Image (cartoon, grey):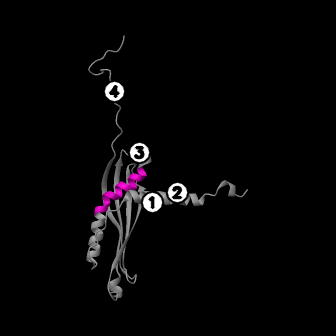
Amino acid sequence: MAEEDTPQNNGAAQPQPSPPQPRMQILAQFIRDLSFENAVAQKGAPQGEVQPEITVQVSLDARKRGSDTQYEVITKYRVTSTNKGDGATLFLAELDYGGVFQIDGVAADQLHPFLMIECPRMLFPYVRRIISDMTRDGGFPAFNMDPVDFVALYRQELARRAQQTAQTQVPADQKLS
């Protein structure tokens, strides 16, 4: 007996179940390390006109926690202000800020970029506020850090690792027998 077209099966293909949507929940946020050094207060103000030049260095780290779906992501920021004229340091601010995340529905091959891009992106507004308050409370104008492009940062790190791997591999014709 042939299958009849019924309202449940009107000849159309049944829809395939969609993959689970990625879900992220911040379980905790914390300051792991915080440091502010006011070189102007220690050494005195530089002579002449002060033209501050600020550099920001960012590094990231992630690790799995006890649960299969929990991860800890640490973002590290180093903000250095120097006088453009003589290169003297005005202040140095360092912040290691972490978050514990519950992550579900992310494919294993996409987990590393997710941890290194999306999680730091969620923590960034808090980091920006802490650094702004820290510089202001340290006697300088509040430093409102520009948003960090975590995608570009991730790509740079992948390129650096690929270059490092290429440099450490010895071509077959150069190997000693």
Tag 2 or tag 4, which sits nearer the N-term?
4
- Name the residue beneath numbered marker 1: 156
Q: Is residue 173 visible?
A: yes
The disc labelled 2 sits on which kind of residue?
Ala
The disc labelled 1 sits on which kind of residue?
Gln
Residue 117 in magenta stretch:
yes
Tag 4 or tag 1, which sits nearer the N-term?
4
Circles 2 and 3: CB atoms closer than 8 Å? no
Which disc number belongs to residue 107? 3
Label 1, label 2: how many angstroms apart (C-alpha)? 10 Å
Quarter in which the C terminus is drawn: bottom right
Residue 86: quarter of image: bottom left
- Name the residue beneath numbered marker 4: 14
- Residue at 36% x, 87% y is 43
Which disc number belongs to residue 162? 2
Label 2, label 3: how many angstroms apart (C-alpha)? 23 Å
